[in-house]
Image (spheres, grey):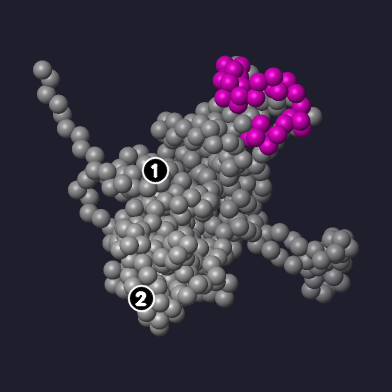
Amino acid sequence: MSSEDFSIRVDGLSKRYEIYAQPVDRLKQMILPRAQRAAGRPARNYFSEFWAVRDVSFDVRRGETVGIVGRNGSGKSTLLQMICGTLNPTLGTIAVNGRIAALLELGAGFNPEFTGRENVRLSGLLYGLSEQELNARFDAILDFAEIGEFVDQPVKTYSSGMYVRLAFSVAINVAPDVLVVDEALSVGDEAFQRKCFARIEAIRESGATVLFVSHAAGMVVELCNRAILLDGGELLAQGLPKTIVSRYHKLLYAPVHSIAAVRDQIRGAASHLECEPGIESTNAGRGTLAGNTPSPPDESWLDEGLVPRSTLRYTARGATIGQPCVTNEHGRRVNVLHAGGEYVYSFNVTIQKPALGVRFGMAIKTTTGFALGGATTAANAGEGLVTSPDREYRVRFRFRALLAPGVYFLNAGVTAAEPEGEVFLDRIIDAVMIRIMPDGRRLATELVDFDVRPDVEMAALA
């Protein structure tokens, strides 16, 4: 890649922090090692080392949008701070082509005693704008921020939402060649977030480079050409967003005892994930695939760490539900599902007493508890089963995962007709937790995919 083709080049980047057990050790480190060397003895360190980032290398092409994902403490923010120049690396080099605008944290660089108006001018000058450029864009900055008369109040009186409005407005109005965002938009209200992402899209379309950290996997898959996975300060893998996000989730939900093994597995497969030069993600937020694109293979798998912590079981009244699980078309247990794939949700039910009008049911809910849908084995109790004691049933519900990427929960229940009406013999809330993986081929625009098939043809003019 020539020097004109890249926006960011990171080579062997490392950041080390010195951790002192007690304040006096810092003083010892300043004095004693010199004395020890002067006396001909090996110098001793009075601190322990912590490498927040270790030997990270990658390039970002001009006009590319790259997402950085990783667990908390993986070094994402430290990496962005070094790229933006607010933190000096211990080892390695960084090269950035063009003007860089960064939104690393709320109001970074703002003086709390200055008014919003004064801080806009200060920040604009720090970004490299001339007085003439700043004056030309000043009204646009204030209009986007929408903080009204508070612009003339000290920013120390601002709410977190007002902080981020003003900081983001400055960053995106300096016409950056490189825009860096570190989860700062998560504090804004929904309407402002939509406004911000629309502006980010416009910046991308203008040919600028965008580098951002986000825990929202769907956003990374939708917006990015490429993604990078960090863990423990190490770059584990980089490649197409969907693939990287899948590995990130596998690491995020892995049991503590298996994290090292998952890291090794991801690291070992990293060579197969790299994007070839010039190859972009098929979605990259710029449209959808043609209708004749073949469906990807089922990539579902079982994540042992994806276990609901909100499971609630009703008091049993003559039945017991057991072994709820989701399986793929080959009968293998899975809980990380491929969008659009076909699966079976099943559970066992043991009936301990005679019962009439027995129906088995399931439901799927969002993380907020909103019920998206469900099904029963009979339309009403009158069409239900008549059962005798000690009967066991295996109940199966076949379904397609026609949902947006995210986490969902499955319920299981069994009801019977009794004199007082239909009652639950047993019920489990949040019996199974599933995750729908992002899919760049998804044409649906909302939470539920109704399998709408668009068709556009040229109409003849009269």
Residue 387: mark in rendering: 2
Q: Nearer the viewer, residue 88 or 453?
A: 453
Q: 10 Å neighbourhood of mark 2: few (<14), some, or many (≥20)?
A: some
Q: Position of residue 264 (x, y in %)?
A: 49, 71
| Quarter assignment of residue 347 | bottom left
Amino acid type at image mark 1: Glu
Q: Nearer the viewer, residue 374 or 78?
A: 374
| Helix, strand or loop for the magenta stretch, by majority | helix
Q: Is residue 283 visible?
A: yes
Reply above or below: 147 against 48.
above
Would you say residue 142 sits in the magenta stretch? Answer: yes
Q: Which residues are magenta?
A: 135-164
Q: Position of residue 343 (x, y in %)?
A: 32, 64
Secondary structure of the residue carrying tag 1 is: loop
Q: Where's residue 298, x and y in %?
A: 31, 63
Residue 98 visible in this rendered orientation of the protein: no
Q: CB atoms at circles 2 and 1 under 8 Å apart?
A: no
Query: Which is more foreground, mark 2 or mark 1?
Result: 2
Spatial CA distance of label 2 from label 1 is: 42 Å
Tell whether position 329 is magenta.
Answer: no
Q: Is residue 166 found left or right of 368 in the rendered image?
A: right
Where residue 311 sits, quadrant-wise, is bottom right
Residue 72 point in image, percent of width and height: 61, 57
Q: Which residue is mark 1?
A: 446
Which residue shows up at 30% across the image and 63% down it? 383
Q: What residue sits 58% from the left and 42% below the top?
A: 186
Residue toward you, 409 or 211: 409
In-front residue for pair 273/105: 105
